[in-house]
Image: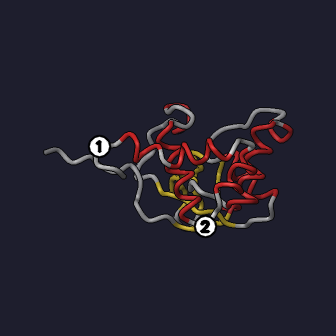
Amino acid sequence: MTKVALGFIPDAISVPLDCLLPSRKLPEGLLTSRKYRQIVISISEVGLIEPLSVLPQDQAAGQYLLLDGHIRVLALRELGHTTATCLIAKEDESYTYNTRINRVSTIQEHYMISRAIDRGVSPDKLAKTLGVDVSLIHKKATYCCRHQPRGC
């Protein structure tokens, strides 16, 4: 059986926001977009659920290239945060991870919602934060158990 190599070091670290170097330019008008406001509200109400993805750049200065999470960094700064939880990539693949993956798959939604509930966020609060009906939160939180033969 062939082992799959991890692309990230499994243990997350806390990195000062000032040590993150952007890998791409953000679109104009982002700060007034609905998506950005949803992210700010979500982080404010629930906290940062998905760590940022970074690649070490200058070990001596403690700087990291931000591979994924540019919008979350802006939201964290707006909310007064000075650090963020990050996963460290093992190598630079010469592209940003955001351009090579689908936005958020059903299973990713399940894991994010389940993780928030496990951390004590009520389904009602999640629904309010995301601007959806609470029944959708319940449906997404139980997705894995309904679709996996052996459960989660």
- Could you tell me residue 62's position as x and y percent? 58, 66
Whether residue 77 sits left or right of residue 9 in the image: it is right
| Disc 1 element | loop
1 to the left or right of 27: left
Q: Sort mark 1 into few (<14), some (14-19) or many (20+) by Cα contacts within 10 Å.
A: few
Residue sitting at 69 percent across and 55 percent down? 124
| Residue wearing tag 1 | 149
Q: Is residue 41 left or right of residue 8?
A: right
Cα separation, mark 1 vs mark 2, equals 27 Å
Instruction: Write down the residue under mark 2.
Output: 120
Q: Position of residue 134 (x, y in %)?
A: 67, 47
Q: Secondary structure at mark 2?
A: loop
* Closer to us: 144 or 104: 144
Q: Is residue 90 visible?
A: yes
Q: Which mark is residue 80?
A: none
Which quadrant of the structure image shows residue 33? top right
Residue at horizontal 62 percent and vertical 48 percent from the top? 69
Which part of the image, by quadrant, shows the N terminus? top left
Image coordinates of residue 39 in percent, x first then y, are 73, 47
Residue type at the position of mark 2: Gly
Say which amino acid is labelled 1: Pro
